[in-house]
Image (spheres, coloured by chain):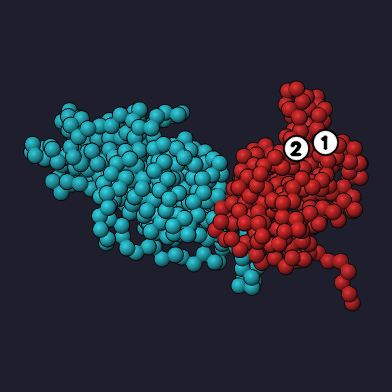
Amino acid sequence: MKVVAKRPEALTDVRLTYCPGCLHGVAHRIIAESVDELGIKERTIGIAPVGCAVFAYRFFACDMVQVPHGRAPAVATGMRRARPGAIVFTYQGDGDLAAIGTAETVHSANRNENISVFFINNAVYGMTGGQMAPTTLPGMRATTSPYGRDVSDTGFPMRVCEMLATLEMPNYIERVSLLSPKEIVKAKKAVKKALKYTMEGRGFSFVEMISTCPTNWGLDPVSSREWARENMLPVFPPGLFKDRSAGAKPGAEKE
Amino acid sequence: MGEKILMKGNEAVAEAAIRAGCRHYFAYPITPQNELVEYMAKRMPKVNGTFLQAESELAAINMVLGAAACGVRAMTSSSSPGISLKQEGISYIAACRLPAVIVNVTRGGPGLGNIAPMMCDYFQATRGGGHGDYYTPVLCPSTVQEFADHAPLAFEIAERYLTPVLILADGLLGQMMEPVEFPEKTPVPKDQSDWCVGPWEGKRTSHHVINSLFIVPEDLEEKTRILFEVYEEIKKNEIRYETYNMESNPSLVVAAAGTAARVTKSAIDELKAEGIEVGLVRPITLWPFPSEAVAKAASGAKKMLVIELNMGQMVEDIRLAVSGACPVEFAGKAGGVVFTPEDIAALIKEKM
Ligand SMILES: Cc1ncc(C[n+]2csc(CCOP(=O)(O)OP(=O)(O)O)c2C)c(N)n1
Ligand code: SF4
């Protein structure tokens, strides 16, 4: 008998506890598949954030560390300097990465730390019950923007890829979306490329994934994806923002 | 033992940490401990170590968390306001049972306070400091030599019990120059491979998880129970203190730590020359606190006088330890104003 589909080795047997239709599960799967395909499970350290993905430490079958809210890139910095041979990735939501942890995000990118940062943008604080995030859209309702986000009062959604792309040092920055099978295939390519760059010591890799939060948006799984396509993609257009080592030989770029 | 080198406390503790095998140091500048950061910046590259100036104290302590999770000797240092920022990270490090060393060269507070040598972080240091039910062992040196000696000791305790260890020195000790002798031997590294993370490629059968989240109350209760069993072990084995002139059966005993204790010793010598006998008990570990030693010192005394460079923090632990066996009085100075030996001698005469 030929196995045509199976759970990636880099995921444990624990059942994912994300809400039905939540795309955190998809993001987990494409990371795990990439780890498997690159054969790096026993060299990889994953960092779980505070947010819905706090339980990522239960789901990934590589070494995992759960860390304080927003500090994953700092922890990753310590790890990769202690163990240069480790492939270190962080997995962070928009509150974690773009609000409380903005400084760690920007500075690890600026130092071009040899890590992969996976950023799940669902425009809301999922775990704590749907509060406004730095990426909440203009006019979008959240429990702490009950009348819709007023940009004159709380600012415009932060475009992290664009911000980081202004820095000189980061190696690879791409925004992808998880809203359809076709887009997921593309997202997986980006994830795998990020991890490959980390393996090769190319520096900072950053992949933002446009995701959904059906529970806190009050939508079913299918309409949440449609809503994200209509509303999030215009504000957060997918694209490649930086790929400094594209085409270059591994190790060719020495800082 | 090697030769004696004249060094500032901040530099001595940095050099001692490197000699103790620390090769990963992360920090953010703050006075009065900048010499420590700068010393590490200079020395670490020479010994193939990591020095990294972090973007904040929050980042620095979490870099330590990351390095410690990989099983290497990692350290950070700061001064009072910066240590406040590190507290969330220290709480996680304690909860995750990671070994790490944190140096606090304290300054005056609260708020931005000043850079004078106040010892006003005693409560923060000895009560865990961050959120949650935990403690960190606290070493409190009173000479530059002792400050240096505490670096290897801190790593030893950190690795033996898998806990963050704090060295609490006041700004005076950080800035003061004294001759130091560095011990030749470094603490033997403990094998951390049964819990740490990092490339394992076939060397174990399963991945490792480092985590402090325990959603089920009974699970967190069990974790906390284990943590407190470790604390009992630490209390059994690691309490350190010094007594001075206690063999003279003094009727008045001073309790003081750090710089306050050092100045008190000079006062005791002066008084001895005048024929007045006064004793001193100096806690070296502020947690675990040498309660029994303090109680013993109090048992033969008519009075205990607690001298601190703050408005009265350690005095609470002294009162608990003395437990009414004799009256306990307090004298303190705030703002970074330091007692002279003459001040203390006069104070003692007044209290006798
Ligand atoms: C220091 C600290 N502040 C606040 C919280 C509470 N908190 C937990 S998760 C979270 C927001 C998470 O949102 P996001 O990062 O967008 O991830 P999501 O849950 O949407 O995946 C907050 C504010 C915390 N745990 N720690
Ligand atoms: S709350 Fe939102 S982000 Fe969190 S698991 Fe549920 S759907 Fe996903």
Is B231 positioned to the left or the right of A230 in the image? left
The residue sitting at 55% across, 66% down in the picture is: B194
Query: In the rendered image, is residue B72 in sight?
Result: yes
Q: Residue furthest bottom?
A: A1
Q: Which mark is residue A159?
A: 2
- Chain B shade: cyan
Give the residue type at disc 1. Answer: Val
Give the residue type at disc 2. Answer: Arg
Q: Which mark is residue A235?
A: 1
Labels 2 & 1 near each other (Cβ < 8 A): yes
Quick one: A237 or A52, which is closer to the camera? Answer: A237
User: Label 1 neighbourhood size at 10 Å, few (<14), some (14-19), many (20+)?
Assistant: some
Q: Earlier in the sequence, mark 2 or mark 1?
A: 2
Element class at badge 1: helix
Is B52 positioned to the left or the right of B39 in the image? right
Quick one: A169 or A57, which is closer to the camera? Answer: A169
Element class at badge 2: loop
Quick one: A164 or A96, which is closer to the camera? Answer: A164
Is B296 positioned to the left or the right of A199 in the image? left
Is A154 positioned to the left or the right of B186 in the image? right
- Cβ(mark 2) to ligand 1 < 8 Å? no
Query: In the rendered image, is residue A52 in sight?
Result: no
Discs 2, 1: same chain: yes
Q: Quadrant of residue B200?
A: bottom right
